[in-house]
């Protein structure tokens, strides 16, 4: 009788162990699935935290432009990361607010495209002085700092005579690559360059053309250098700085050609140019500008003064290059 009871107990214990073992075997897949879900959740949280705490600072540029009275003019601004590679940062959909500095009303609110560029197309009547356009980026709370920049809109009558300056190669006493890598305080203007433009300014409106300012930091750097505090004899005349950073992706030569073409079509007065390299000189001539090239051997200052004299006495636009 005791043997039978013991056998029954042993049988019950065996069944219990089997049931527990089956339950444990069934629970491993469940535990692994739960662990996987937990790891995914923690990864997402960590990623969001790192993205929100590690977003790069953005810098803003508001670009100069020039137009005829009451015509549609493209007013542009751009955000770019200060340091990180451009492709690694999401720039689309960021709000930029455009406002004329002397008006309490907004010109508009525009979201940036994938390249950080935002544009408006207003119209303005003729103005004796350039309009200042303030562009603001409000930032993102606890994520990105706000930013503000100021651009200018030059409204000139159709009869305006225009002098286009190759700003990358004519004005500074260092070559273009060194200019971008040098602090503005250490860059001097080419001796006599400001006087040349001041003399020409009595008859011409000056446009500064830079094919090299294709990024926001470069544009802001060159603009700041052109507007630097200096003795009156070394100050450059006021004028718009036109550069490819203000447009969707475009190569240097195409930007220069299209910009010069627009100036030639817009203004019926004489349009002339002073270039510092053969490449720009050729592009200027192809666009129909009377062109002087200051590069090469010889006394650059003397050549610049001679160019200024000829520009100041020029009365019509012809496609030639007195070099």
Image (spheres, helix red, strand yellow):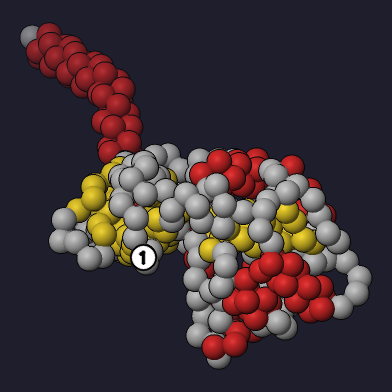
Residue 11 % position (x, y): 18, 12
Residue named by callout 1: 128
Task: List the single residue furthest toward the right.
Answer: 297
Residue 289 % position (x, y): 69, 50
Q: Residue at x 59, y 77 (%)?
A: 198
Work out whether 103 lies above or below 122. Answer: below
- Return the residue nearer the eye: 290 or 208: 290
Residue 183 % position (x, y): 60, 78
What is the quadrant of residue 254 in the picture?
Answer: top right
Q: Which corner quadrant holds the C terminus?
A: bottom right
- Return the residue nearer the eye: 253 or 159: 159
Work out whether 48 lies above or below 160. Answer: above
- Return the residue nearer the eye: 173 or 293: 293
What is the quadrant of residue 31 in the picture?
Answer: top left
Q: Which corner quadrant holds the N terminus?
A: top left
Query: Few, some or many C-alpha atoms within 10 Å of disc 1 (few <14, some 14-19, many ≥20)?
Result: few
* Residue 63 makes an appearance in the image: no
Tag 1 secondary structure:
loop
* Residue 296 makes an appearance in the image: yes
Q: Residue at x 74, y 60 (%)?
A: 275
């Amino acid at each position: 009788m005791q043997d039978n009871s013991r056998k029954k107990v042993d049988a019950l214990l065996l069944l219990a162990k089997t049931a527990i073992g089956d339950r444990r075997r069934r629970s491993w897949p469940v535990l692994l699935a739960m662990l996987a879900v937990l790891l995914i959740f923690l990864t997402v949280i960590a990623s969001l935290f790192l993205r929100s705490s590690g977003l790069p600072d953005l810098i803003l540029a508001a670009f100069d432009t020039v137009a005829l009275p009451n015509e549609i003019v493209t007013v542009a601004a751009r955000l770019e990361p200060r340091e990180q590679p451009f492709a690694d940062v999401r720039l689309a959909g960021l709000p930029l607010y455009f406002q004329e500095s002397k008006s309490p009303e907004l010109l508009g609110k525009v979201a940036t495209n994938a390249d950080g560029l935002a544009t408006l197309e207003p119209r303005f009547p003729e103005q004796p002085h350039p309009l200042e356009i303030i562009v603001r980026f409000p930032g993102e709370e606890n994520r990105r700092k706000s930013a503000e920049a100021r651009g200018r809109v030059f409204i000139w009558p159709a009869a305006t005579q225009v002098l286009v300056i190759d700003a990358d190669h004519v004005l500074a006493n260092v070559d273009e690559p060194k200019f971008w890598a040098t602090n503005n305080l250490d860059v001097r203007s080419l001796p006599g360059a400001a006087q040349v433009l001041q003399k020409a300014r009595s008859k011409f409106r000056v446009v500064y053309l830079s094919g090299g300012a294709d990024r926001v930091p470069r544009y802001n750097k060159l603009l700041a250098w052109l507007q630097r505090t200096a003795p009156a004899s070394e100050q450059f005349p006021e004028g718009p700085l036109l550069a490819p950073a203000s447009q969707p992706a475009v190569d240097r030569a195409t930007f220069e050609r299209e910009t010069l073409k627009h100036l030639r079509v817009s203004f019926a007065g004489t349009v002339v140019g002073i270039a510092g390299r053969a490449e720009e000189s050729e592009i200027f001539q192809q666009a129909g500008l009377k062109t002087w090239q200051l590069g090469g051997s010889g006394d650059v200052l003397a050549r610049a003064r001679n160019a200024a004299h000829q520009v100041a006495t020029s009365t019509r636009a012809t496609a030639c290059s007195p070099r």
